[in-house]
Image: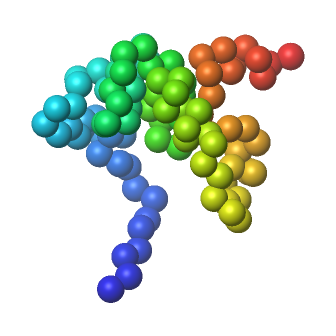
Amino acid sequence: MTQTFTKTQTSRQKGHEMSRPGEKPDKGKMNGSCNRFACQAPGATWYNHSTERYYCERCALDINNFKPPGDTFLAALGHDLCTPPDFERQSKP
């Protein structure tokens, strides 16, 4: 059976936070814990433009280094998936 996905609000967009045992309450938030469950290091400041969550620098760079062949999303985005905290200032003239 093939699943079809439509553009609807996610649980997070509706204000529902999903969590599981062992997950820190500040996971994925700016200056909180890294959004990767296996990491959850403090000081997450790198923004992921796909998940709309924050990651520590090490995990963000790991995510950026994964580039699947034929991925058109990253090309259309025009920059790495995860960007550092000063990205907005860097990209403005």
Locate residue 77 relative to residue 6 in the image: left or right.
Answer: right
Residue 33 horizontal/vertical position (percent): 35, 21
Locate residue 39 relative to residue 63 in the image: left or right.
Answer: left
Locate residue 50 relative to residue 19 in the image: left or right.
Answer: right
Q: Quadrant of the image for the N terminus? A: bottom left
Q: In the picture, residue 69 is in which quadrant?
A: bottom right
Residue 60 in the image: above or below residue 73: above
Residue 19 horizontal/vertical position (percent): 20, 37
**Which is more toward the observer, 14 or 50?**
50
Furthest-left residue in this view: 21
**Which is more toward the observer, 92 or 65?**
65
Residue 61 horizontal/vertical position (percent): 59, 33
Residue 51 visible in the shown view = yes
Residue 3 in the image: above or below residue 56: below
Residue 63 in the image: above or below residue 72: above
Residue 58 in the image: above or below residue 5: above
Q: Determine the residue positioned at 23% across, 25% down.
A: 24
Q: In the picture, residue 22 is in which quadrant?
A: top left
Q: Determine the residue positioned at 33% across, 26% down.
A: 40
**Which is more toward the observer, 31 or 57?**
57
